């Protein structure tokens, strides 16, 4: 029985421990691999930044900024915030290091923890893990399609199937302001409660995201951005769709999509999985025309996504799948006695140097217990070394898949094991 610990992880903060941690790594790395295949370079960002970066970058009217940020004063009395998302930090770093003055687009990918003080529930954590990409500096619909296709193939490469891609356009600065006014005019004509009315004043789009049935009903005929796009934004959206069709990436247009962050313009998308209950978004992203300028940089556009690693694991589980994870080790060494241990430790080291994953039975267990541990470790080969073998400069190599075993000279062990492992 496990002993109750004095401490537990903070509320809403998941641990990933073996064996589940192997799946966490497989899902995260699988999603990253899709981005690497399209030439995205790695960016490692600070976990905390100036609070103002997120307030200005993510948007003062969003729930993320007003209710969910982990903000605190450091010992120098500066207000800092644990990053709630990655895009604002990437833009800050791109500007700070002048990457936007080099070759465009700047293509970057990242992964790691993000922090939002949300009400914890299944699939909604306060420390969440994302894999993200950003392609900055070129406003080309083909790039939008590339970013979306990377996410789509990342999920598919993991074996995920039951998700759909929802797509819309949030317009540009020539059509969005007029649409906003039109929507506000519509909303102010409705008998809205005071809170909702205030929301309509600050960010009317968010009212379309209201889950209450009475508000849904009232806003059923609200004007939609997609019906009021400028010619440029419409042409951009049409081209993105044509590229996605050509790439064979399926999608549905959802003109009522509302994202939780304020920086989006033009192409905006979400990946939704129906096996997850309320927290169905496994990834999302879009284009952000004004963000870099708003953060003090050039007026360059960008597009990117953030994919939820935690939710992708849950989505796989909902489909009865797990991401393929490598066994913890390939070879398990079992020394019978101290002299054998002294001889086997360097053998294990030699095998590791040759790139083979090896673990040893420590603690002087009996053969039976050690063989059990070997099976559990996932190894395909057990190396058993007893006094008799040691005396003859030999070792027993046992293939755990078929039970066959051979006694071979110690000097040949790397070659023999290499052959056996290659067959695995
Ligand atoms: P986001 O939609 O806020 O976008 O988050 C992206 C993904 O992170 C979500 O689709 C979801 O899978 C996961 N996620 C968000 N909150 C939680 C949570 N509390 N618990 C578990 N998973 C969560 C962004 O963050 C943007 N920065 C994406 C982006 C990049 N847009 C452009 N570039």
Image (spheres, grey):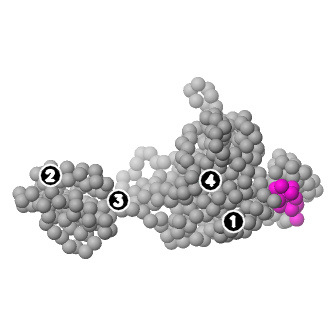
- Frontmost of labels 1 and 4 is 1
Disc 1 CB within 8 Å of nearest ligand 1 atom: no
Question: Along the horizontal axis of the image, is 119 left or right of 376?
Answer: right
Task: Give how far across and how far down residue 399 sits, in percent.
Answer: 24, 69
Q: Secondary structure at mark 3?
A: loop
Q: CB of mark 3 within 8 Å of CB of mark 1? A: no
Residue 224 sits inside the magenta stretch: yes
Q: How dense is the environment of label 1, judged by Cα within 10 Å: few (below 14), some, or many (20 and up)?
A: many
Instruction: Tell me: residue 73, above or below residue 153.
Output: above
The magenta stretch spans which residues? 221-234
Looking at marks 3 and 1 on the same chain, the residue that comes earlier in the sequence is marked by 1
Mark 1 and mark 4: span between their CA atoms?
Answer: 19 Å
Name the residue tied to disc 1.
244
Q: How dense is the environment of label 3, judged by Cα within 10 Å: few (below 14), some, or many (20 and up)?
A: some
Q: Secondary structure at mark 4?
A: strand
Task: Give how far across and how far down residue 143 sits, in percent.
Answer: 68, 55
Looking at the rendered image, the quarter that the C terminus falls into is bottom left
Question: Along the horizontal axis of the image, is 18 left or right of 335?
Answer: right
Disc 4 CB within 8 Å of nearest ligand 1 atom: yes
Looking at marks 1 and 2 on the same chain, the residue that comes earlier in the sequence is marked by 1
Name the residue tied to disc 2.
343
Name the residue tied to disc 4.
306
Q: How dense is the environment of label 2, judged by Cα within 10 Å: few (below 14), some, or many (20 and up)?
A: some
Looking at marks 1 and 4 on the same chain, the residue that comes earlier in the sequence is marked by 1
């Amino acid at each position: 029985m496990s002993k109750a610990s004095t401490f537990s992880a903070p509320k809403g903060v998941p641990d990933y421990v073996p064996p589940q941690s192997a799946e966490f790594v497989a899902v995260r790395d699988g999603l990253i691999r899709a981005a690497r295949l399209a030439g995205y370079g790695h960016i490692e960002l600070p976990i905390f930044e100036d609070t103002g970066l997120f307030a200005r970058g993510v948007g003062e009217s969003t729930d993320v900024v007003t209710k969910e940020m982990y903000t605190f004063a450091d010992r120098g009395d500066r207000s800092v915030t644990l990053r709630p998302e990655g895009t604002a930090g990437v833009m800050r770093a791109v500007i700070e290091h002048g990457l936007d003055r080099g070759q465009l687009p700047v293509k970057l990918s990242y992964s790691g923890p993000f922090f939002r003080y949300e009400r914890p529930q299944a699939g909604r954590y306060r420390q969440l893990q994302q894999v993200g990409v950003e392609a900055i500096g070129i406003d080309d619909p083909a790039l939008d399609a590339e970013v979306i296709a990377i996410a789509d193939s990342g999920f598919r490469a993991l074996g995920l199937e039951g998700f759909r891609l929802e797509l819309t356009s949030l317009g540009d600065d020539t059509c969005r302001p007029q649409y906003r006014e039109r929507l506000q005019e519509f909303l102010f004509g409705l008998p809205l409660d005071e809170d909702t009315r205030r929301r309509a004043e600050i960010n009317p789009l968010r009212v379309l995201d209201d889950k209450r049935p009475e508000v849904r009903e009232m806003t059923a005929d609200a004007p939609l951005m997609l019906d009021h796009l400028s010619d440029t934004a419409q042409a951009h959206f049409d081209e993105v769709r044509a590229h996605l069709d050509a790439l064979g990436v399926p999608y549905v247009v959802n003109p009522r999509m509302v994202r939780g962050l304020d920086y989006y313009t033009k192409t905006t998308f979400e990946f939704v999985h129906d096996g997850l209950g309320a927290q169905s978004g496994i990834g999302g992203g879009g284009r952000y025309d004004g963000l870099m300028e708003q953060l003090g940089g050039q007026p360059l556009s960008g597009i990117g996504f953030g994919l939820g690693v935690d939710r992708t694991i849950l989505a796989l589980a909902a489909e009865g799948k797990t991401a393929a994870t490598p066994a913890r080790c390939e070879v398990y060494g079992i020394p019978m006695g101290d002299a054998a241990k002294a001889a086997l430790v360097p053998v294990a080291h030699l095998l590791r140097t040759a790139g083979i994953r090896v673990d040893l039975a420590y603690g002087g267990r009996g053969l039976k217990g050690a063989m059990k541990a070997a099976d559990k470790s996932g190894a395909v080969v057990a190396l058993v070394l007893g006094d008799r073998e040691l005396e003859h400069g030999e070792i027993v190599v046992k293939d755990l898949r078929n039970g066959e075993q051979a006694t071979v000279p110690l000097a040949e062990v790397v070659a023999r094991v290499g052959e056996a492992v290659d067959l695995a």
